[in-house]
Image (spheres, grey):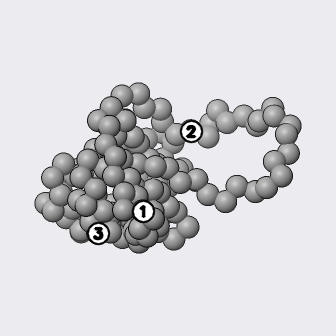
Amino acid sequence: MLYSQPSTLNSQPSTNNINMPAKAISIRPFIGAKDFEVSRNFYRDLGFEETVLFPEMSVFKKDDLAFYLQNYYAKEWVDNTMLFLEVSDVDEYFRQIAALDLPSKYEGVRLAPVKNESWGRECFLHDPSGVLWHIGEFVK
């Protein structure tokens, strides 16, 4: 699995001078589920609000953030799905997740402690299907 550290150090402005006619509102990834019902319960326990769109797909929202969970599993895809959730206080976020004790409730769920990186700090959460969440905050 390839992993690239998030970085703003090498950011460069776009050389594309096309003016987009509309403002982007959000980005919502689609993630798969090995066991759709287990994953739905996991994300509700994590504090996301679920809206069922179809019997095989839901959108999960928290504040202005959202993602789609679908009843589809391809091991190669799910094992390589990573999401980065930027938070204002990674230590507090870690404490809140740890208090939920999700690894004891869901097989395969792992929570790794906060670690320091050159760009900021992050912890890791694996969902029941193997989707890897990077939860972090950037150096200010």
Residue denoted by label 3:
45
Mark 1–mark 2 CB contact (< 8 Å): no
Q: Quick one: label 1 or label 2, which is nearer the N terminus?
A: 2
Q: Tell me the kind of residue under disc 2.
A: Ser
In the drawing, does residue 33 fall left or right of residue 63?
A: left
Q: Residue at x 27, y 65 (%)?
A: 41
Q: Quick one: label 3 or label 1, which is nearer the N terminus?
A: 3
Q: Position of residue 25 (x, y in %)?
A: 67, 59
Spot the residue most to the front.
55
Q: Where is residue 12 in the image (x, y as percent from the top left)?
A: 72, 34
Spot the residue most to the top.
2
Mark 2–mark 3 CB contact (< 8 Å): no
Q: Position of residue 90 (x, y in %)?
A: 41, 59
* Above or below, comparing residue 40 to residue 126 in the picture: below
Residue denoted by label 2:
7
Q: How much space separates mark 3 and mark 1, taking CA atoms?
A: 21 Å
* Above or below, comparing residue 93 to residue 83 in the picture: below
* Above or below, comparing residue 4 to residue 93 in the picture: above
Residue denoted by label 1:
54
User: Closest to the observer: 102 or 69?
Assistant: 69
- Mark 2 Cα shell of 10 Å, populated few (<14), some (14-19), many (≥20): few
Q: Position of residue 30 (x, y in %)?
A: 46, 49
Q: Quick one: label 2 or label 3, which is nearer the N terminus?
A: 2
Q: How much space separates mark 2 and mark 3, taking CA atoms?
A: 31 Å
Mark 3–mark 1 CB contact (< 8 Å): no
Q: Tell me the kind of residue under disc 1.
A: Phe
